[in-house]
């Protein structure tokens, strides 16, 4: 196995490799000049409201004078913002180029050559005569939930000064509105784990959200499960240690319903118990949700006579005599389980390049992010200024750790995935291959899953404060290379 390290990329040593794809959204070139022009297309060609949408832009820089591009920027409508930009397959005739990223979190930003707006004379993206030099980039666009209609993305290029002026051109790519959902969509947790001291009874809440339209109807039952094989939700099986408060209900669009689950450690012997919570709904895409349940009964009895403040909050939760952890793979379901006042972070204020940690974030819920292993040049490498956190190198020991330092946190979630920033066997960068992601909470709870894209989400809501969270990608891929484990779009707060 080998350790992947980011290396300075000398594009003069590589020839272009054809990238074959079909694009349906083709832009219109404005005021094309002989010196610099741009054509291109986007995949996909539409956007979802209230989401960060990712687009692969297949751009062609056109120049009869072989001029390059000093600045490649993107202009979005008001309240629509850039979340991140990344290079997928780009080329420059110049070996000594220093593009910086700016404007993330705003409506206008992208790549700027060092020294901009003074023209460099040898741009970081090369052009060539028609049909132009292919430059493939990735742009993440944060679309608010109330945006409707077509969404124009204006791509602007500033030439490097080779050839006669003017040295500017633009391209408009129009993204269509996917529209609001027309059917109910059920959003639920992925799993639930509860541990109680002997003799203790505790209630947990199952939050059922309708993130679609119309009325969501649901029915909750239980089934036997060994915790490994998929459960048979068609065969109901009552669990002596679990009582469901309301087994049927309806949820209006955009709302949620709370179902009380009562766990009783006084009815069973010490040990671990598994089952499945089966939630049948009229969600046409997912009519049945099987939620794994793990119930652990501790051998010791609860010794706390006054459990007030035991979990760090001014309430009577049984923080000293038991704990529970809800795990989510759906952002809508997670947010429905988080109390108002939570904080979000898309890491758009981070600069390009190597950075020493720890990095400090947050308002009420303050936290520090550290990376390992540490290097003299820095702990983090913010590759091309992409709005996400990553380590300098990728290996079995590379980790990102969030440590909470402010108000108690019991809810944390975000997008977590594997990113191949640089593969020395390919000119393609920023690939997102299937990657084993490991997330460990400060209390030792571990979540492991295979990520396939930057849309993968994991969230946790606990009954006791979460002191830290560590993300890693400790397994090499099929080629023996390690992938960077990264996270973005963090949500931090307190569970309801």
Image (cartoon, rainbow, N blue to C red):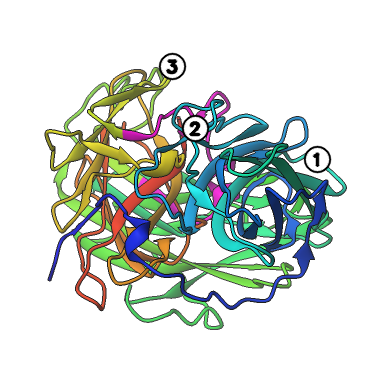
Whether 170 is among the magenta residues is: no
Specify the farthest residue to the right: 149
Secondary structure category for the residue under label 1:
loop
* Residue indicated by mark 2: 348
Check disc 2: other Cα within 10 Å, few if <14, some if 14-19, many if 20+. many
Whether 333 is among the magenta residues is: yes
Q: Is residue 329 left or right of residue 12?
A: right
* Residue indicated by mark 3: 364
The label on residue 147 is: 1
Whichever of labels 2 and 3 marks the residue nearer the N terminus, that label is 2
Secondary structure category for the residue under label 2:
loop
User: Can you see residue 205?
Assistant: yes
Q: Nearer the viewer, residue 457 or 395?
A: 395
Identify the image quadrant of residue 188: bottom right
Identify the image quadrant of residue 27: bottom right
| Residue bounds of the magenta highlight | 325-353
Residue 277 at x, y = what percent? 49, 65
Q: Residue at x 12, y 71 (%)?
A: 1
Could you tell me if the residues under marks 1 and 3 are in contact, i.e. CB atoms within 8 Å?
no
Check disc 3: other Cα within 10 Å, few if <14, some if 14-19, many if 20+. some
Please tell me whether mark 2 or mark 3 is closer to you in this view: 2
Identify the image quadrant of residue 74: top right
Residue 112 at x, y = what percent? 52, 35
Distance in Å between CA atoms under marks 2 and 3? 19 Å
Residue 243 at x, y = what percent? 48, 56
Distance in Å between CA atoms under marks 1 and 3? 29 Å
Q: Residue at x 74, y 61 (%)?
A: 45
How many numbered circles are shown?
3
């Amino acid at each position: 196995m080998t350790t992947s390290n980011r290396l300075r990329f000398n594009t003069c040593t590589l020839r272009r490799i054809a990238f074959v794809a079909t694009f349906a959204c083709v832009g219109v070139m404005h005021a094309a000049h002989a010196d610099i022009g741009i054509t291109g297309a986007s995949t996909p060609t539409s956007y979802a409201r209230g989401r960060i949408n990712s687009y692969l832009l297949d751009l062609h820089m056109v120049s009869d004078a072989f001029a390059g591009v000093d600045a490649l920027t993107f202009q979005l409508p008001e309240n629509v913002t850039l979340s991140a930009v990344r290079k997928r397959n780009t080329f420059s005739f110049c070996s000594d180029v220093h593009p910086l990223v700016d404007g993330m979190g705003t409506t206008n930003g992208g790549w700027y050559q060092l020294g901009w707006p003074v023209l460099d004379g040898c741009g970081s993206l090369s052009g060539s005569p028609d049909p132009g030099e292919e430059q493939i980039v990735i742009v993440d666009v944060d679309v608010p939930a109330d945006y409707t209609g077509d969404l124009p993305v204006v791509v602007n290029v500033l030439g490097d000064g080779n050839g006669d002026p003017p040295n500017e051109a633009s391209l408009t790519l129009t993204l269509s509105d996917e529209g609001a959902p027309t059917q109910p969509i059920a959003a639920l947790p992925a799993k639930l784990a509860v541990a109680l001291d002997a003799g203790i009874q505790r209630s947990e809440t199952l939050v059922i959200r309708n993130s679609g339209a119309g009325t969501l109807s649901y029915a909750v039952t239980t089934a036997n499960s060994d915790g490994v094989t998929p459960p048979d939700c068609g065969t109901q099986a009552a669990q002596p240690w679990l009582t469901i408060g309301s087994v049927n209900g309806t949820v209006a669009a955009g709302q949620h319903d709370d179902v009380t689950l009562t766990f009783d450690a006084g009815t069973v012997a010490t040990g671990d118990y598994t089952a499945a919570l089966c939630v049948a709904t009229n969600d046409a895409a997912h009519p049945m949700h099987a939620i794994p349940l793990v119930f652990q009964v501790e051998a010791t009895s609860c010794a706390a006579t006054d459990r007030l403040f035991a979990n760090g909050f001014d309430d009577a939760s049984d923080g000293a005599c038991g704990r529970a952890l809800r795990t989510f793979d759906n952002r809508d379901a997670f947010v429905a389980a988080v109390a108002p006042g939570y904080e979000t972070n898309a890491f758009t204020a981070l600069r390009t390049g190597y950075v020493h940690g720890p990095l400090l974030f947050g308002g009420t819920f303050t936290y520090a992010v550290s990376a390992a292993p540490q290097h003299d040049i820095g702990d983090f490498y913010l590759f091309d200024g992409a709005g996400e956190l990553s380590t300098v190198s990728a290996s079995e020991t590379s980790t990102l750790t969030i440590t909470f330092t402010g108000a108690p946190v019991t809810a944390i979630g975000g997008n977590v995935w594997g990113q191949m920033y640089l593969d020395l066997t390919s000119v393609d960068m920023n690939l997102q291959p299937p990657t084993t992601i490991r997330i460990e909470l400060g209390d030792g709870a571990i979540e492991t899953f295979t990520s396939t894209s930057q849309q993968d989400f994991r969230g946790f809501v606990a009954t006791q404060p979460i002191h830290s969270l560590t993300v890693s990608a400790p397994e090499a891929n099929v080629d023996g290379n390690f992938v960077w484990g990264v996270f973005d779009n963090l949500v931090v707060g307190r569970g309801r």
